[in-house]
Amino acid sequence: MRTVTDEERRSRLGVRHGLAPSTRYADPVAAATGLTALHTTEVASVPLSLRARVDGVTVDDVRGALERDRSLVVQLGMRRTLWTVPRDLRAAVLAGPAARVAEAELRRLAKDVEEAGLAADGLRWFAGVRDATLEHLAAHPEPLSVPQLRAAVPALSARVVRGTGRWTTPVWVATPVTTVLGARGDLVRGPNAGEWWQPRPTWTTTERWLGTPPPLPTAQEGYAELVRRWLWTCGPGTEDDLVWWLGSTRGAARAALAQVEAVEVRLEDGAPAYLLPDDLEPVGAPERWAALLPTLDPTTMGWRHREFHLADGVRPGVYDSAGNGATTAWCDGRVVGCWVQDEAGVVEVVPLADVDRASRRLLDAEAGRLTRWLDGVRVTNAYTARQRKSAPLP
C-alpha cells in the first residue's frame, strides 16, 4: 500500500492550493475550482484568499466574478458554513450538505415560531412566509437586504428567541427564514452592499440571479462530486477529515468515497487516508514559498487533522478551541506564525516558530505585497488583539 509522507502532503498543498509562485491560478474562478470552495463567513476572506493565489487579482475582479459574471456563487452548505463556490458546483452543494442544513434549520425555525406564539403550526407559518417573500422578490428588480425584506413582508418583522439559559436573545425571524430559503436554493445572495470587507448581504430569487437552475443531482451524487473535488484539492485525507469538512454523516462520506472509487493509502503516522484513483503518483516539491492567508482560509480549514502542516507549538496561536483558523503565515507547507496590521495598515508577520533567514525574507516580501494590495484598508477579526501579542486564541 502506498504511503504518503507529511513532506509530500505539504508539497501537494503548495501545488494544488496555488500557493507556490509557479502554481498560481489564472483567475478567481480557476482558483475557487482548484480549492473546491472558499470560506465566506468572514466576507473579507474571499478576496484575501484569492489574492494569495491569483497574481494581480483585484477586488473588482472578485466582485466581477460574484456580481457581474456570476461565475462564483455564495451558498450556505457544508457544516452550516457560508461558502463561495464555482457556479457549476452549487447544485452538488444544494443536493447534499445544504439540504441537510435546510432540514435541520427548518425544524428549528418551526419550533421557535410555535414557542414564540406566532403560529400553532410552525411549518405552515413558514410556507406562507416563504411564498410571500419569494413573490415580493420575484416582482422586485433589485436584490434586497434583510431590513428591506422586513419592511416589505410584515411577518418577517416578528421576533423569535434563540439560545438557552443566560444566553437567550431575541432575533428578527427574517434571519432564520432567509437562512432556510438560502439553504434550500430558493434564494441566493446578491451583491454585498458594503465595502469588500463589510458584510452587507442582499437577497434575490435564484431565477432572477442565475436563471433557470439545472436539475439537482441526488444527495449521494452531490456528496460524491464534492468528495471528488475535495480529494483532488486536499488528498490524501482521512475519513475523519472528510466527515468534518462535509458536515455529513459517516455513512454519506463512505458512500461518496466508494462512488468515486477512492483508493486507500497510508499516511506517515500509519492512519488510513484516500486519494483519487488517477492521483496516485507522487507530487514533487515546488520551489520555496511563503504565504499570508486570512481568517478561515480554505487551506487553513481543509482538514480536521492538521499536524502535518503545523510547526511545533503553533496551534494555540492560530486555531481557537473550536478549530477555527485565524490569520496564518506559511512557509513551504507549514504554518509558522500569523499576521496582523498596525494602525497605518502595514502588515506585520508574527512568528510563532523558528524560521531560517531565507524563509524570513520570503515572509517579509509577502507582507510588503499584502500591505500594498490592502492599500490602507485594515482588516480585523475577533483574534487580532491576541495574535498581536502571540497569545493563545480562546
Image: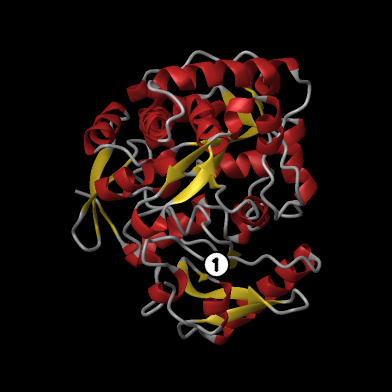
Position of residue 315 measured from the top left corner of the image (x, y, whole percent): 39, 72
Residue 284 appears in the rendering? no
Disc 1 residue type? Answer: Ala
Seen from the viewer's position, the closer of residues 359 and 166 is 166
Q: Residue furthest front?
A: 117
Q: Is residue 28 left or right of residue 350?
A: right
Residue at the (63%, 26%) spot, across then down = 154
Check the image and report above or below for 148 versus 52.
above
Graded by Cα atoms within 10 Å as few (under 14), some (14 to 19) or many (20 or more), the crowding at tag 1 reads: few
For residue 19, side relative to residue 121 (left or right): right
Q: Secondary structure at mark 1?
A: loop
Q: Nearer the viewer, residue 293 or 170?
A: 170
Q: Nearer the viewer, residue 181 or 288?
A: 181
When the figure is inspected, residue 89 is found, relative to residue 63, above or below; the finding is: above
Task: Kindly indicate the quadrant of the structure image that contains residue 268.
Answer: bottom left
Task: Tell me how many marks there are.
Answer: 1
Residue drawn at x 74%, y 30% as measured from the top left: 69
Q: Residue at x 33, y 63 (%)?
A: 6
In the rendered image, which residue does mark 1 sit on? 382
Residue 286, image x and y in percent?
52, 61
Image height of 123 relative to 280, above or below: above
Residue in the picture at 77% in, 44% down = 61
Colour scheme employed for the rendering of this structure: secondary structure
Residue 355 appears in the picture as rendered: yes
Quadrant in which the C terminus appears: bottom left
